[in-house]
Amino acid sequence: MNENQQIIEVCHDLAIHHLKDIDVLMGMNKREYYIYFMIKDLEQGYFGEYIKQKINVFTAEEKKILANNLLKLYETGENIYLLRDTIKKIFTNTYIFSNAQEKDEIIFFLRTKKTEQKQQKLEVIKYLFLPFKCTVEVYWETIFGVMGVKELMKMEHIINY
């Protein structure tokens, strides 16, 4: 064992230096590795066949957002907060209203034109983060007026609810 101890220390030293070099070159930290592996799990179907089929509608940056928030979901269990955070990061300039006290309802006003790709992105996000008890209403380009929010009180952008 004493003879092999020196070899073990040298191999350990080489491995640690190699990992340090990889880390410096790739700019990845521990969290980035977790995100990388989470994206691979999403793509390989560990979150279900539905996610495996739909995950490629997201850009690489959007996949990182999804993976990071999934890791946070495992750490905190705050699915409503992370649902809102994911929606706001992927669909910028979005309004989200929630009525969790009365009837567990969430309303998304995405303020963008509805396309098949955007619809698929939204469905994947809902699949990953939405609790079973919540219902969701989605408005794409028009929404009902909201008192106190000037942008949502324009006549040409209001619908009846």
Image (spheres, helix red, strand yellow):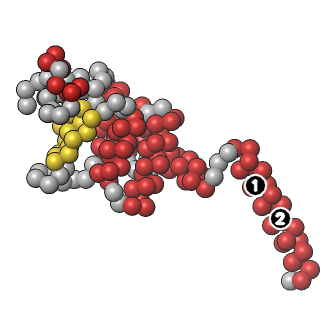
Q: Quadrant of residue 88?
A: top left
Mark 2 surroundings within 10 Å by alpha-carbon count, few (fewer than 14), some (14 through 19), many (20 or more): few
The image shows residue 116, relative to residue 40, as above or below, that is above
Real-space CA distance between mark 2 and mark 1, rounded to the nearest whole angstrom: 11 Å
Residue 145 place in picture, x, y as percent: 14, 29
Q: Quadrant of residue 19?
A: bottom right
* Left/right of residue 70 with respect to residue 60 in the rendered view: left
Regarding mark 2 in the picture, which secondary structure is present there? helix
The image shows residue 43, relative to residue 145, as above or below, that is below
What residue lies at 47% left-to-right and 47% top-to-bottom? 67
The image shows residue 13, relative to residue 33, as above or below, that is below
* Left/right of residue 98 with respect to residue 86 in the rendered view: left
Regarding mark 1 in the picture, which secondary structure is present there? helix
Q: 71 and 158: which one is in front?
A: 158
Which residue position holds label 1? 20
Amino acid type of the residue that numbered disc 1 sits on in the rendered structure: Lys
What residue lies at 13% left-to-right and 29% top-to-bottom? 144
Which residue position holds label 2? 13
Q: 97 and 59: which one is in front?
A: 97
Residue 158 place in picture, x, y as percent: 14, 23
Residue 30 place in picture, x, y as percent: 61, 56
